[in-house]
Amino acid sequence: MPRRFRLAYVPGVMPAKWVRKWEERFPDVPLELASCTVAGSAALLKDDGADAVVTRLPRALDVGDPGPHHAIELYAETTVVIVPKDHYLTLADDLTADDLADENFLVPLDDVLDWPARPGTVVEHRPETVGDAVELVAAGMGLLAVPQSLARLHHRRDLVYRPVTDAPTGRVVLLWPSPTADLTDEFVGIVRGRRAGSSRGRDQQQPKRNAKEKAAAKRANREAAGKVPGRNFGKGARRGRR
C-alpha cells in the first residue's frame, strides 16, 4: 500500500501552511485531509482513523480517550463574544467579563471553551452545535462566547464579535498516537519549524507517485486552501458545520 499521511482537523483550524510545507518536502507522499469534531478527535486517533489531529484541549480529552499519545500546543486562541450588530456592546472595541454579567448566553452541546466561571446567565435551551447557536444569536435569544476562529468561520453580516480580554484563551494542539511513526515525526517537525534535512528528520528515499496519488495530493492542497470541503474518514469523524 502506498505511503500516505492522514491529518484530521477541527472547525476553525487552517492547516494550509503545514500542507504546503509537506508538499515541498515530501512531494511523493500524499497528505490526506479530513474534518472532524473536537469531541470525536480522540476516538479518531484510537480507531486509527488518522495519523494526527489538530484539535482543541482540554475538550478533546475530556470527552474521549485517544490511548497512549503525544500533544504539542500550536497556538492560543482569543475568546470572543458574538453579538447582534446593533447590540450596545458593539460600542466597545473589547470587553471584560464584568461587561457581560447581565447578558444571557447560549452554550451549545459542542462548546469547546474551558471557562467554568463564565459570566452572565446560561440560556436553558442548548443548541446542538456552534453553528446552530450563531443562528439563535441572530434571532436575539442570547450571546455566544467562542474561540475567535469559530467566530470567523460562522461570520454573518448581521452579527459581530468582540474580544473578551480577561477570558481564558483556547489551546489548539497537535495530537498523535504513541509511539511516534516516521511520517508523523516529519509532520511534527514541520509544525515546530524544523528545517528540511535537519538532524532530527528522517533521511528516507521516497517512492514515486502514480497518477492517483498525485491527484490525492492536489486535492489535499485545495482542501487546505478552503477551495473544496475535506472528506471525513474514520469512526467518529464529522464535518464541521459552517
Image (tube, helix red, strand yellow):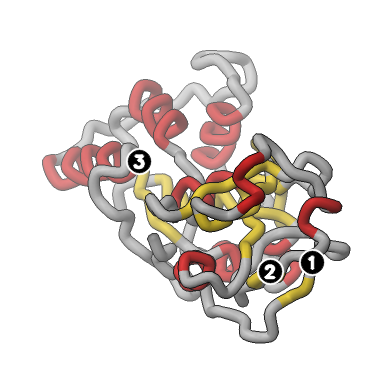
Left or right: 59 in relation to 227: right
Left or right: 207 in relation to 120: left
Q: Position of residue 111 (x, y in %)?
A: 64, 67
Question: The residue under label 1 is which amino acid type?
Answer: Gly
Q: CA distance from mark 2 to mark 1?
A: 7 Å
Residue of label 2: 105
Question: Element under label 2?
Answer: strand
Question: The residue under label 2 is which amino acid type?
Answer: Phe
Residue of label 3: 224
Within 10 Å of the Cα at label 2, are there few (<14), some (14-19), or many (20+) other Cα atoms? many
Q: Position of residue 76 (x, y in %)?
A: 70, 39
Q: CA distance from mark 3 to mark 2?
A: 32 Å
- Are the residues at dot 2 and dot 1 in contact (C-beta closer than 8 Å)? yes
Left or right: 116 in relation to 46: right
User: Which mark lies nearer to you, 3 or 2?
Assistant: 2
Give residue 199's mark: none
What residue is at 63 percent from the left and 41 percent from the top?
Answer: 91
Q: Quadrant of residue 217?
A: top left
